[in-house]
Image (tube, rainbow, N blue to C red):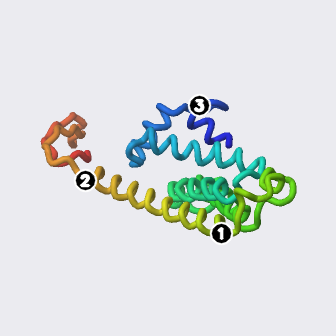
Amino acid sequence: MAHGVQKLFGWFGGRGIDQTGATFDRLGFHPGKLNAIAAGLGEAAGGALLAVGLGAPGASAAVAGTMIVAASMHIERGFFNSKGGYEYPAVLGWSSAALALTGPGSLSLDHVLGHRLNRPWMRNLALAAAATTAVAVIARQRRTRTHSAKPDPTPQAVSSLGEDGRHIERAHQGGQG
C-alpha cells in the first residue's frame, strides 16, 4: 500500500505521480504517467483491499501482477534485496497470489459479505489475467527500450584527451560517446 501512495500522491517520502510518471517514461513504460497510475493503484488499492479482505481474488491479482512487473525491473541485480534484486517484489507477489488461491479467511469483509466477491472461479481468472497483463507490459517495455536504445545516426562532436593531455574534438557517428 505504502509504495502505491508514494507513487500516486507523494506521501511517505514518495515522488508523486508526475515525477514517478517521468521515471516510468525513462524506464520505457510509455505513457509513463498512465503506467505509474496503474502501478500505484495496483499497489495501493490492491493492498488496501487485501488488508480488509475484500474482493480477495481481484485485489490479490492486482498486487501480484504489479509485483511481477516490479520484479522484472530487478532481475539483472540477482535475487537478494540487499543487492537491489527481485526478492522483495517476488515475496509480495507470491504472497498475494497465495491469498488469492487460499481465500481471505473468516476475519475478512469477504466472509462477512458471504464471499460475493470471492468466488472460486474468480481466483484463477483474476490471476491468469494479471499474469498475462504483466507479461504483456514487460514485453512492451522491453521492446520500447530496445527501440529507444538504437544509436543516433547523426554525427556528433566527441571530446577526448590526446596523448599530450589536450582535448581533441572529432565527429562521432551515433549517440554513444
Residue mark closest to the camera, 3 vs 2: 3
Return the x and y of residue 95 as percentages of the image width and height.
Answer: 71, 61
Residue closer to the observer: 159 or 109: 109
Q: State the SS at label 2.
A: loop
Q: Which residue is mark 2?
A: 150
Quadrant (top left, top right, bottom left, bottom right) of the N terminus: top right
Identify the residue at horizontal 40%, vertical 54% (top origin): 141
Q: Which circle's residue, 3 or 1, is located before the other in the chain? A: 3
> Horizontal placement of 37 versus 140: left or right?
right
Residue mark closest to the camera, 1 vs 2: 1
Q: Which disc number belongs to residue 121?
A: 1
Mark 3 and mark 1: Cα distance apart in space: 34 Å
> Horizontal placement of 33 versus 46: left or right?
left
Identify the residue at horizontal 71%, vertical 65% (top origin): 98
Q: State the SS at label 1.
A: helix
Amino acid type at mark 3: Phe
Q: Are marks 1 and 2 in contact (CB under 8 Å)?
A: no
Q: Is residue 125 above or below residue 106?
A: below
Residue closer to the observer: 122 or 91: 122
Q: Which residue is mark 3?
A: 9
Amino acid type at mark 2: Lys
Identify the residue at horizontal 57%, vertical 35% (top origin): 8
Q: State the SS at label 3.
A: helix
Residue mark closest to the camera, 3 vs 1: 1
Quarter where residue 41 is shown:
top right
Q: Which circle's residue, 3 or 2, is located before the other in the chain? A: 3
